[in-house]
Image (spheres, rainbow, N blue to C red):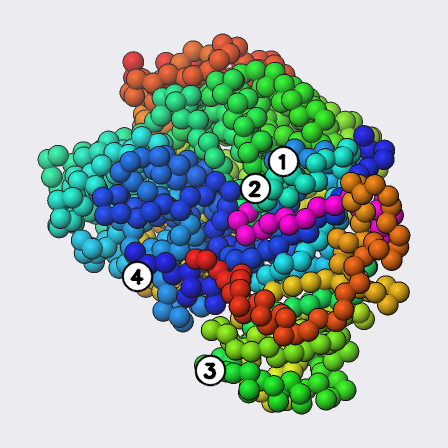
Amino acid sequence: MSNLWPRIEPLLAKVEKPARYIGMERGAVSPEHRPDLVAWLLIYPDTYEIGLPNQGLQILYEILNERADALAERAYAPWTDMEAALRHAGLPLFSVDTHHAAGEFDMLAFNLSAELVYTNVLNLVDLAGVPVRSADRAPEHPVVVAGGHCTYNPEPLADYVDAFVIGDGEEVAGEVTEVVGAWKRAGRSRRDVLLRDLATIPGVYVPSMYDVTYDGPAVVAVTPRHPDVPERVDKRTVADLAEWPYPKRQLVPLVEVVHDRLNVEIFRGCTRGCRFCQAGMITRPVRERPEEQVRTMVRDGLRRTGYDEVALTSLSSADFSGIDRVVADLVDDQEGTGGVSLSLPSLRVDAFTVGIASEIQKVRRTGLTFAPEAGTWRMRQVINKLITEDDLYAAVDAAYSQGWRRVKLYFLTGLPTETDVDTLGIARLAKQVVEIGRRHTKQASCTVSVGGFVPKPHTPFQWFGQNGVEELNRKIGLLRDALRGTRAQLKWHDPAATYVEGIASRGDRRIGRVIERVWRAGGTFQEWSERFDLTRWLDAMAAEGLDPDWYVTRHRHADERLPWAHVAAGLHDDFLWADWQAALAEHGLPDCRWTPCYDCGVCTDYALEHVVASPVAPAGGSQGTGQDLSRGDAVPVRFVAAASATGKQ
Amino acid sequence: MRGSATHPVRLRYAKHGKVRWTSHRDVARAFERAFRVARLPLAFSGGFSPHPRVSFGLALPTGAESDAEFLDVDLTEAVDLDALPGVLTAALPDGIAVTAAATLEARAPALMDEVTSCEWHVTVTREGSTFTCDELRPVVAAALARDELPVARVRKGRPTVEDVRGVIERFDVLGDTTEGVLVHLELLTRPRSAKPDDVIVAVASATGAEGLVVVRAVRTAQWIERDGARREPLCTVVHPRRATRARDTEEGIDVPRPDPRDHRTERVGAGAHSDPS
């Protein structure tokens, strides 16, 4: 193994933010490479600033380095200036921990959190000196694996990634290490033998072990090539977070990164049932971390890192049982230490959460964010985000009255059944919010962030035809006109990028060649607006003879085989279809933590249970809790009976 | 606590090795975290958004190393100043070491306003070919004979041309090392401070010497010149252990102009500050 640092350092004087490439974070390790260890290079395929805080990657980094048979280092996508300098100097992608060449590791393990990073994955494999297509790799090359939410539709990268890990990685990372370790000890011959062994690990999907059959444009079958390869790959789920108090040594970077604070995961999974939300669907059931462990992780983490901010992370942090107690104790703990601030990402929209927020943000009350997601009650019933206008106005009133001056609202547009009344409802809400704010302070302002909706696999909206670029632009135009001259500031996501996300999100195996073409044409860092170019994608689709609208804007039929059907998040197909039909009928579905099970499939099929400390819903919020749900505009919410939501059991 | 009497402390620290690629801001944030890890009784500014009262000195350019960086921090109570450097160094990234701590006079002017000059050891090489001090000496002599040494810079996003001749107090070519030619510079901070890289670029472009690059720059000292005497920033303070308050003339150490030969021995002989990796 060779340390490349002496050759990398001379490049640093000429690149932006050179400290991205030095490692040296508090908590980082410098493992010794030995032939008997399986060497993992954990790669986040975006910049250091975006990738470093990723908790999944940090958890695996610790777990693998604690093992006697493995070591793990990290790499991030070098920015374009550094990549050019590396290629010019004939240097490969390297680890930031010990500056070893990526190609000398046994495993290149990518975290896939967003579809637009796919071209970066190919670029980094190439920069590592490894053939980008799996079929071209030899036994001496690293095994390319990937995990993260995007792997629930692995097909677009199926020809490029040797093995995908579906679901929670804590346990399966060790199982993969053992299989690869055995293969190394046996002389590291025959890559196909290793891949076939990997394919037998539950939760591991090896695309080269499956044949895809097409009928015209449609995928009609994905068939295992061997009897020991499973027809369907089920996700892995860690049953009890208490057994996994990671990261224990969160990395403290020297460079300023996103989410630059202590992050403590308080629960995993969410059963609010928002129909657009892939994370909520694929991470079920809810598994809370014990309250006492949360306290310990926060206390130890703050003491060790020196951070003055801690985030209690989850998909809806105010839903944690006893959140008010935890927050109050943490605030008391920090009394007199110079002010540690707490943040709760993904706040529910209600006055209760504002109460918590005011408890934790005693000093810095700059902005508070809520995500009503849609502008009318009808639309929010369709997406099952059951926030009433009263909830929102009470939350906003509480926020402004308690000293916040700026409220940020997140919305989606291009949702199923959306009409211009729904779109303009966003502007109506925003204006009302500003109005409420001005009763409290003349400086009241409101930022409205609008993103185009991309239907995701394994959600009830996976059959929906996404809005095209023109339609999304038209809707954004409506909102711009409606908010012109008001104190509500509109921000929006580029509909062209939304469109490409749609291609990759529900793409099949043929989209891989499109990604490869875009990469070869120089299309890296596609989630960076200054680097994104729709034309490259459309040209690549045309060159592959594929119709982008067929992938993006087309509604799928009930009997169509979806390209990701051989990957299972545990949700029954008939549950998802019934929930899709309920959405179209504007029916809500309650949260099963506190109401009877409607059998989505996850707990029953995987013998799992919710791990929730409180048998009752948290106070103050109506959203999906079954409490006082008839206060919305004119249309009262109606729940679909559990029996009709799914035909099973 | 806010607004009450504080205990101002001045720290000297060094920055060497890989960590030299962090920015001035990165180092400031690392210190603020280290203060909290070390549980220092920090004094906070008042107002809507309180911040620890820390005042950093002249920015060290990203990529440069230093033996002589300074910062001031206000504490709410006295701490053991002998133990402080070790405690903080343990909480800081590898390569950043606090080397001294002392109580600061309550009314001491801001570090940035006080420092009048900085000394540097700079290693210069020529891209693509070997380079010796015998080649550099006539280049420097020719450059220093000029009245102006313009260099193109970008300030606040706008390109400008600045003259660096006026800030060059000393420019001694010390000798050859394995990395290149070692140079000793003393640069004034007024009217406008210049980086060693700017000075080398200006010297090179004024004399037509192509391809000169700085491979290593180490700030070796910062000086405060007042009333004809030079003091190190840390020597303007009174250590509380002294029984009597020192007289003005004894507060600082009068320093004779350094003999470049001494630096040569110290720097080259010791081979200090090379990156261990």
Q: Are dots 1 and 2 on a single chain?
A: yes
- Please state which amino acid type lies under the numbered disc 2: Ala
- Please state which amino acid type lies under the numbered disc 3: Thr
- Please state which amino acid type lies under the numbered disc 1: Ala
Alpha carbons under labels 1 and 2: distance apart: 9 Å
Magenta stretch: includes residue A405: no
The x, y position of residue B128, in whole percent, is 45, 81
Alpha carbons under labels 2 and 3: distance apart: 40 Å
Q: Mark 3 points at which residue?
A: B130
Q: Mark 1 lies on which chain?
A: B
Mark 1 residue element: loop
Q: Name the residue under label 4.
A: A129
**B254 over A146 or under it: above or below:** below
Residues in magenta, as a range:
B93-113
Q: Can residue A51 be seen in this view?
A: yes
Mark 4 residue element: loop
Q: Which of marks 1 and 3 is nearer the N terminus?
A: 1
The x, y position of residue B165, in whole percent, is 74, 80
Task: Give the residue drawn at x 76%, y 37%.
Answer: B75
The x, y position of residue A195, in whole percent, is 18, 44
Q: Mark 1 points at which residue?
A: B38
Magenta stretch: includes residue B107: yes
- Please state which amino acid type lies under the numbered disc 4: Gly
Whether tag 4 and tag 2 are in contact, CB under 8 A, the answer is no
Q: Mark 4 lies on which chain?
A: A
Task: Give the residue drawn at x 55%, y 34%.
Answer: A304
Task: Give the residue drawn at x 23%, y 48%.
Answer: A35
> Quadrant location of the C terminus of chain A?
top left
Whether tag 1 and tag 2 are in contact, CB under 8 A, the answer is yes
